[in-house]
Image (spheres, rainbow, N blue to C red):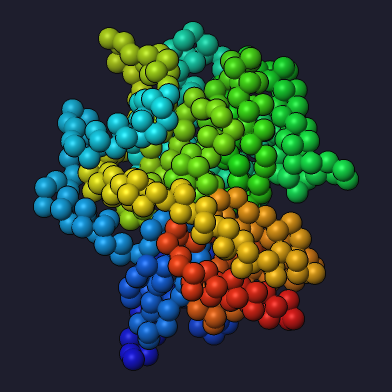
């Protein structure tokens, strides 16, 4: 339709936009290693460029989009909110969307996590949970509890505090000198099973590592932070819920806070609204972001328990939680979140996703038994598998080949994963499964 317009947008973007998580040189036209795609609009599970090509957004635009692009119900809620209140500061002021959202989130945890603190992006939520944990201990006379524990392969964001509890070498190594040390424990990744071991055995072994560390220096540790059920950014490493149950017991025994980072796995992604529900536990702090606004607006939050809230409640300003962001509790973002929660209710999303997920798993069966595939795995609305003997440029080649097949899929190393929005119909499920198989065969053939 307008090919020149498409190229023009690319050239202008490359001149002035510094794209995230990208070696910009790879986008340069002459080596064409990685195309840059200007998106003109989105509809449902599809993104469209300026030349009328379309891409099935099989990774929910970095795991944020739950109910499709330009969702009519979320759009309507936002249009209504725009004419009422776009923003007001949350210090000294409050408003309907933030109140209703906090109440509904509390109810979703059976009022176990009844106090919600707001920010804008996931990394800030992690920073807040870390600061709150430390400060809650200090307010309780335990100022010596200052250390944080994370898991091998953990990812909690890329600001300096969040990066300190992240264990992805590519993101962390370059900035190592800036970061506070943290303790790293074994990952319960079920792929670590040794001969004859079950996923539960791996969970027990990983929990024993936590027990060892807590016994050694629990009195110095403020909190352990975990991505429950699926460590996404390291390559969709999945573990048995038993791990969370065991770590919860250890946290209680050794007086260590449990921070669950549900930024990627919350909001129904693993099959329950919160991933931790599958382990029958609640954390001391729960972080949400990404899907909570339906993928519309930057919104993150930290939910916590009554006793932690009470540790800050005082006439003394310095005992209060000292943290704020300009857009804390933004009404538009909260309204998008309310519309998202409404869809969960109206469409019985957790139940319909179970049916959708079973169909998807069945459609992916040829990949599950492919002789170049190992560790095919699924939890809720996440599917992943590892390519055997993948070439070093597997991930980039898979991504560019997938685009030719109208699919947006970005493998992590040699792990291919699908994390689609919760709206795929039977035709889209078939298209996605067949396309993923075709792309995989093409890339593996070299
Ligand atoms: C994406 C992510 C973050 C960081 O969120 P941002 O909004 O990108 O800062 C933190 N933790 C997990 C588990 C994530 O997936």
Can you give x and y, in whole percent of width and height, for residue 4 in the image? 35, 90
The residue drawn where x is 66% and y is 49% is: 237
Identity of the residue drawn at 11% across and 47% down: 84
Residue 203, compared with residue 145, is above or below; it is below
Check the picture and name the quadrant holding the C terminus.
bottom right
Q: Quadrant of residue 54?
A: bottom left
Q: Residue furthest left?
A: 83
Q: In this picture, is 292 found above or below 223?
A: below
Report the residue at 70% width, 58% height from top: 376
x and y, in percent, of residue 435 in the image: 58, 76
Q: Nearer the viewer, residue 18 or 349?
A: 349
Is 41 on the left or on the right of 37, as rendered?
A: left
In depth, the one of 147 and 405 nearer the eye is: 405
> Is 232 in front, or is 352?
352
253 left or right of 311?
right
Image location of residue 69, percent across then percent down: 35, 64
Q: Residue at x 41, y 27 (%)?
A: 110
Q: Give the quadrant of the N terminus.
A: bottom left
Q: Is residue 324 visible?
A: no
């Amino acid at each position: 339709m307008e090919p020149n317009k498409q190229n023009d947008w690319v050239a202008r973007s490359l001149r002035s936009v510094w794209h995230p998580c990208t070696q910009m040189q790879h986008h340069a036209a002459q080596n064409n290693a990685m195309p840059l795609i200007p998106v003109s609009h989105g509809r449902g599970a599809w993104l469209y460029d300026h030349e009328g090509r379309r891409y099935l957004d099989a990774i929910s635009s970095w795991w944020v989009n739950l109910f499709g692009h330009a969702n009519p119900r979320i759009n309507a809620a936002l249009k209504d909110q725009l004419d009422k209140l776009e923003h007001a500061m949350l210090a000294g002021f409050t408003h309907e969307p933030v109140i209703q959202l906090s109440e509904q989130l509390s109810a979703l945890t059976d009022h176990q996590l009844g106090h919600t603190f707001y920010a804008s992006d996931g990394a800030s939520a992690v920073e807040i949970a870390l600061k709150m944990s430390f400060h809650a201990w200090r307010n309780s006379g335990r100022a010596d509890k200052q250390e944080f524990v994370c898991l091998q392969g953990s990812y909690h964001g890329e600001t300096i505090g969040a990066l300190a509890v992240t264990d992805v070498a590519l993101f962390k190594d370059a900035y190592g000198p800036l970061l506070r040390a943290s303790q790293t424990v074994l990952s319960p990744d079920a792929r670590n099973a040794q001969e004859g071991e079950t996923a539960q055995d791996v969970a027990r072994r990983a929990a024993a590592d936590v027990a060892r560390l807590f016994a050694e220096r629990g009195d110095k540790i403020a909190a352990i932070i975990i991505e429950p059920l699926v460590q996404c950014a390291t390559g969709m490493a999945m573990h048995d819920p038993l791990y969370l149950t065991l770590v919860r017991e250890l946290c209680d025994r050794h007086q260590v806070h449990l921070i669950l980072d549900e930024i990627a796995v919350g909001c129904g992604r693993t099959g329950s609204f919160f991933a931790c529900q599958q382990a029958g536990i609640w954390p001391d702090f729960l972080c949400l972001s990404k899907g909570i606004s339906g993928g519309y607006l930057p919104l993150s939050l930290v939910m916590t328990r009554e006793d932690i809230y009470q540790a800050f409640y005082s006439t003394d300003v310095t005992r209060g939680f000292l943290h704020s962001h300009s857009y804390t509790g933004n009404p538009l973002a909260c309204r998008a979140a309310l519309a998202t929660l409404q869809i969960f209710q109206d469409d019985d999303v957790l139940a319909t996703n179970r049916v959708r997920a079973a169909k998807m798993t069945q459609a992916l069966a040829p990949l599950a038994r492919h002789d170049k595939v190992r560790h095919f795995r699924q939890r809720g609305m996440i599917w992943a598998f590892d390519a055997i003997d993948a070439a070093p440029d597997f991930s980039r080649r898979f991504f560019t080949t997938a685009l030719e097949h109208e699919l947006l899929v970005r493998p992590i190393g040699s792990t291919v994963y699908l994390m689609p929005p919760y709206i795929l119909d039977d035709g889209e499920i078939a298209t996605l499964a067949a396309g993923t198989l075709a792309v995989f065969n093409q890339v593996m053939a070299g």
